[in-house]
Image: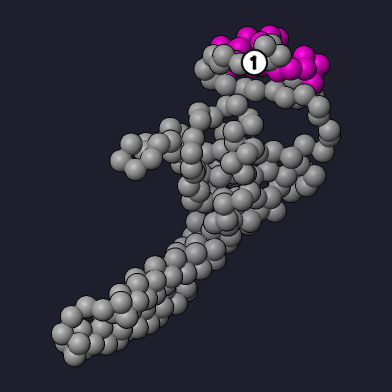
Amino acid sequence: MENLDLLHEKFEEIYAQSHETFKKNEWLRILILLAVLVIDAFLGFILIKLILFCGKIQSGHLVILVLIFAVWKFGKKYIEYSIKDTVMNSFIAPFGDLKWDMAEDFITKEELKKSLILPSFSEYEVDDEFKGSFYEYPDTEFIIQEMILKQGVGIYKCNVFKGVVCKFFIPKHFDGHTIISENKLILEKEYKPIKLEDSEWAKQFNVYSDSQIESRYILTPL
């Protein structure tokens, strides 16, 4: 209970610091938003004048319309990224050597499909990503990504997975492949069910592996 109280106090302190950081950067968000609105208003004024002068819409007018949309999208994306970059990295810094980002290449599509854990998908979207390590274990890095996996085309596209995916780097080479799932899976014949000593674990998870020894090494606490 004492550890939980300390964690709660630490969280409250970090949250307050992050909130203060956000307020300090609020002026930048407002300034960029105003600049975007002014630019788009100016481009819109030029577009209307040109249409009235020409009497009809031409290809050059469409270029300006696309430019108006691009300015808005770029400004919105820049505001989102710059504010979240400052606030999120300030928030997670006390928990370890962590870094927040919005890149989409930390866990690749090929790695997700090769894992055999997630359902088949045609595209994925990533929101927040965290990469780094705990102070106590600097050699064991991890990646946490919040993502949505989709399958289908057009109006038939639907979400097949929405959640958090984690990837851990262990400072040891493994030749085998171990799969942990809450559901029972039908896999290729080289993947055998693994029975572990922890009965509570067996009630919640199903473990499959093509290497009995390596799977037990990975999942057995020291």
Q: Camera-side residue: 95 or 161?
A: 161
Mark 1, residue position? 188
SS type, badge 1:
loop
Q: Is residue 168 above or below residue 180?
A: below
Residue 73 image point, x, y percent: 39, 68
What is the x, y in percent for residue 49?
21, 89
**Residue 220 seen by the camera:** no
Quadrant that contains the C terminus: top right
Q: What residue range appears in magenta?
A: 193-214
Residue 85: image location, x then y, percent: 54, 63
Determine whether 89 is above or below 70 in the image.
Answer: above
Estimate the x, y position of residue 18 in percent, counting from the top left: 51, 62
Q: Residue at x 15, y 85 (%)?
A: 55
Amino acid tagged 1: Glu
Of residue 92 and residue 46, the one placed in the foreground of this image is 46
Q: Is residue 18 left or right of residue 167?
A: left
Left or right of residue 61, residue 198 in this image? right
